[in-house]
Structure formats: C-alpha cells, structure tokens
Amino acid sequence: MGITENDTKTIQETDTDVLTEDPCTLIVWNDEVNTFEWVINTLMEICGHSHEQAEQCAYIIHFSGKYGVKQGSYDELKPMCNAITDRGIGATVEVIA
C-alpha cells in the first residue's frame, strides 16, 4: 500500500499551525547511499517496526522510490522524520489528501 504524489502534499514549515491536526504519512525516500540494514535498523529504532515490517518497508522504498512507513498526526511524525533525516536518510511528513 503506497502513497502516490497525487495522494499527498508536503507540509511546509510555515503551514504547521494549520495542518497539525490533519492525518499525515511519514515518507522515507530511496537513495543510493544507505544500506538496507541501516534503513531497517532505523525504522525499528525510530518507528517501532518489527524487523520483518522494517525489512518489507526497505524493499518497497528501494523498488518504488519512496514509501509511507507510518501514519499519524504531524506532531507525532515530525520528531520521527527529524530523527530519520539526522541519520542521513531522506524523509518527509506529508498530509494525506
């Protein structure tokens, strides 16, 4: 179950006051730098995924270019997004349209 660009819009920092109550998705983006194991460990530690769930997400990210790894409120997902990007992995929080 993936989220396409047509289904989402990226939250800009200036819009957070208005959009924090909207349902959001934490999107992790594929790159050619990070290993599967690094992404899997990150999803387990930051998002609370099981190893199997994190591994499935990593494969979907790799083959689809991005994947919505977690849904929730902006306030819940933004710290996770920051922690993921702090590890050198591309991530964004997007409003579910």
Image: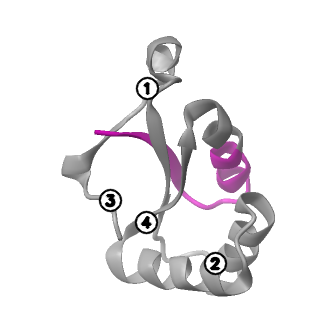
Say whether residue 8 is magenta: no
Residue at 65 percent of width and 74 percent of height: 39
Mark 3 and mark 4 residues within 8 Å of each other at the beta carbon = yes
> Which numbered dot is residue 3?
3
| Whether residue 81 is situated above or below residue 49 in the rendered picture | above
Tell me the kind of residue under disc 3. Answer: Ile
Residue at 61%, 85% (x, y): give it: 55
The residue depicted at 24 percent of the width and 52 percent of the height is 5
Q: Nearer the viewer, mark 2 or mark 1?
A: 2
CA gap, disc 4 to disc 1?
A: 19 Å
Q: Quadrant of the C terminus?
A: top left
The answer to whether residue 37 is above or below residue 3 is below
The reply to whether discs 3 and 2 touch (Cβ–Cβ < 8 Å) is no
* Residue 82, horizontal then vertical, whole percent: 68, 43
Residue of label 4 = 67
Mark pair 3, 1: CA separation: 18 Å
Name the residue that disc number 2 marks.
Answer: 54
- Please, what secondary structure does the residue beneath circle 2 have? helix
Q: Residue 9 placed where, x, y %?
A: 31, 38
- Pointer 2 with pointer 1, Cβ within 8 A: no
How far apart marks 3 and 4 lie (CA) works out to 7 Å
Task: Judge from the rendering whether residue 10 lies leftward or rightward of residue 28; answer left or right.
Answer: left
